Amino acid sequence: MIKDWFYKKLKEDIGIKRYEHSLRVMETSIELAKRYNSSIEKAAVAGLLHDCGKLKGETNLLKVCSDFGIILDGMTKINSELIHSVLGAAIAEKEYGIKDEEVLKAIKYHTTGRENMSLLEKIVYIADLIEPGRSFEGVDKLRKLALEDLDRCLIYSLDNTLKFLIENKKIIHIDSIKARNYLLIQTTME
Ligand SMILES: [Fe+2]
Ligand SMILES: [Fe+2]
């Protein structure tokens, strides 16, 4: 699924720092795919391209979205952190030729999460947070949890994200709340 030219284009589009982060997310996604018997090929391409919408420079992401015909929901439109995921899924499809819906969704929901995430979506979401270049309080616990229980790891990271958003008076996307509720209900029913 990954073509040689993906690497060059990605580096040019998002810049070296984000490109190197993307390579680490790809490696971590592959590790998690092996651990949870998920498709390694899909994990690799979704991990590599997850931030392909983080176009470098002064690019107006809203303008690019409208050029792609993307209609953003109200919560995404006003949060620049969220736009790149939705845009990334469109770029992955139209510019990298990715047709696999599961891969496109893993890119689209890697920032917010969503209700009833697929295994691949969970893998990319978590890999983005725990790749070796990340250092924040609690990351080691997340890395350990990721290998033990992906759902608990996801709940723990959603908890942290929501706490951070509340403490910093930031808008919480409804999909993150739905993702957390769904996982909590599911894990308590086990
Ligand atoms: Fe991202
Ligand atoms: Fe990322």
Image (cartoon, rainbow, N blue to C red):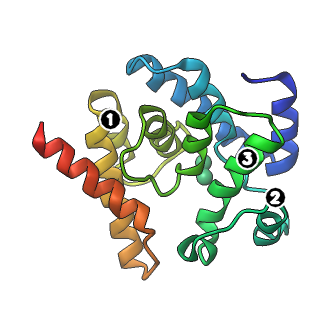
Horizontal placement of 164 versus 33: left or right? left
Q: Relative to residue 48, is residue 114 depicted above or below?
A: below
For marks 1 and 3, the one nearer the N-term is 3
Alpha carbon distance from label 2 to label 1: 32 Å
Foreground residue, 143 or 66? 66
Quarter of the picture containing the N terminus is top right
Res. 99 mark = none
Kindly indicate the quadrant of the structure image that contains residue 45. top right
Res. 52 mark = 3
**What kind of residue is marked 2?**
Lys
Residue that badge 2 annotates: 56
Q: Nearer the viewer, mark 2 or mark 3?
A: 3
Find the residue positioned furthest to the bottom: 169
**What kind of residue is marked 1?**
Leu
Kindly indicate the quadrant of the structure image that contains residue 154. top left
Name the secondary structure under disc 3: loop
Residue that badge 1 annotates: 150
Q: Relative to residue 63, is residue 146 depicted above or below?
A: above
Alpha carbon distance from label 1 to label 3: 24 Å
Percent from the top left, x then y, of residue 130?
46, 41
Percent from the top left, x then y, of residue 189?
11, 42
Kindly indicate the quadrant of the structure image that contains residue 174. bottom left
Foreground residue, 47 or 39? 39
**Is there any visible trace of residue 176 in the rendered image?**
yes
